[in-house]
């Protein structure tokens, strides 16, 4: 059974950093692309970042480029989102999700439970 | 990249069919067949309903179908049921090598 377990969310001050983790089970990160999607309180979905199954290609929304970095540890089957220079507008529930295929097409068939990141002074 | 445009709300009676539109541009919806649709119930993670415009993942009811014409994609729900009441989002690949979601549509079953 495919499962995704996120962790690392919390309260951080503006300008601070946080690293989110997404531990996968029941599948291999090396076989599927992975995506980060966020949802601000009461708002819609926003695509944040993705990484291909090969791990060679990463993609970022303009709103986070240069501040966020997606990476993975295949030995732990875990995906990461390093978030630096956090802003109030980054406050959201962050979801990790597994794509149906090897390439990052934002076709996400399994999702984590989400982890809340709150950026506030 | 601006969000794709969806109607804020759509409603229908049980058993009816409804459609949700998703309007983008020639640089996203109109250019690529990488359109997907998600259903989200309150407090839950989204669920993939349709990918690559019209493909259904295994386990998704055939009451859900997708299509595209020009810069507009559509999701049709046939035989509307009470459990279909939820928020629905479209998504598309863009020429900037990124993805964008729609503004979201709240479906109400009367």
Image (cartoon, coloured by chain):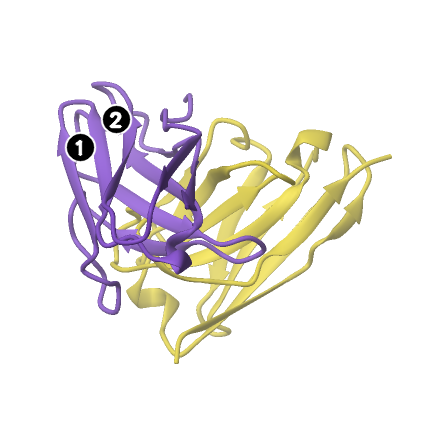
Residue A55, located in which quarter of the rendered image?
bottom left
Task: Tell me, by letter, which chain the rendering colours yellow.
Answer: A
Chain B in the picture: what colour?
A: purple
Q: Secondary structure at mark 1?
A: loop
Look at mark 2 in the image and give the residue it sits on: B28
Residues under numbered marks 2 and 1 in contact, where contact means CB atoms less than 8 Å apart: yes
Q: Nearer the viewer, residue A78 or B71?
A: B71
The percent coordinates of residue A75 (x first, y second) are 47, 74
- Residue occupying the far left of the picture: B69
Q: Give the answer, above or below, for where A43 lies relative to B79.
A: above
Quadrant housing residue B68: top left
Hey, which residue is sitting farthest top in the picture?
Answer: B26
Mark 2 to mark 1 CA distance (whole Å): 6 Å
Left or right of A74? Residue B52 is left
Question: Tag 2's secondary structure?
Answer: loop
- Of all chains, the one bearing label 2 is B
- Residue drawn at 26 percent across, 58 percent down: A102
Question: How many numbered marks appear?
Answer: 2
Q: Quadrant of the C terminus of chain A?
A: top right
Q: Tell me where residue A22 sits by quadrant.
A: bottom right
Q: Please state, as top left, top right, bottom left or bottom right, where the N terminus of chain A lies in the image.
A: bottom left
Q: Position of residue B60 (x, y in %)?
A: 26, 63
Residue drawn 22% across and 36% down?
B74
Residue B42 rendering spot, x and y as whole percentages: 55, 53
* Residue B32 tag number: 1
Dot 1: chain letter: B
- Which x, y percent locates residue B28? 25, 26
Q: Is residue B58 above or below residue B37?
A: below
């Amino acid at each position: 059974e495919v499962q995704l377990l996120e962790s690392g969310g919390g309260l951080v001050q503006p300008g601070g950093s946080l690293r989110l983790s997404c531990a996968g089970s029941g599948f291999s990160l090396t076989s599927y692309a992975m995506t980060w999607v966020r949802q601000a309180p009461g708002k819609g979905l926003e695509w944040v970042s993705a990484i291909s199954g090969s791990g060679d290609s990463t993609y970022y929304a303009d709103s986070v480029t240069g501040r966020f970095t997606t990476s993975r540890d295949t030995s732990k089957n875990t995906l990461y989102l390093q978030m630096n220079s956090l802003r109030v507008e980054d406050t959201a529930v962050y979801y990790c999700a597994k794509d149906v295929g090897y390439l990052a097409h934002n076709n996400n068939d399994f999702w984590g439970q989400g982890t809340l990141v709150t950026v506030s002074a | 990249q601006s969000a794709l445009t969806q109607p804020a709300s759509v409603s229908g009676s049980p058993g009816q069919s409804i459609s949700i539109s998703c309007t983008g541009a020639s640089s996203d919806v109109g250019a690529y067949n990488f359109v997907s649709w998600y259903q989200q119930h309150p407090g839950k993670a989204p669920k993939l309903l349709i990918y690559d415009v019209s493909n259904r993942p295994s386990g998704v009811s055939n009451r859900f179908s997708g299509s595209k014409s020009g810069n507009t994609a559509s999701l049709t729900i046939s035989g509307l049921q009470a459990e279909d009441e939820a928020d629905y989002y479209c998504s598309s690949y863009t020429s900037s090598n990124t993805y964008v979601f729609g503004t979201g549509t709240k479906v109400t079953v009367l």
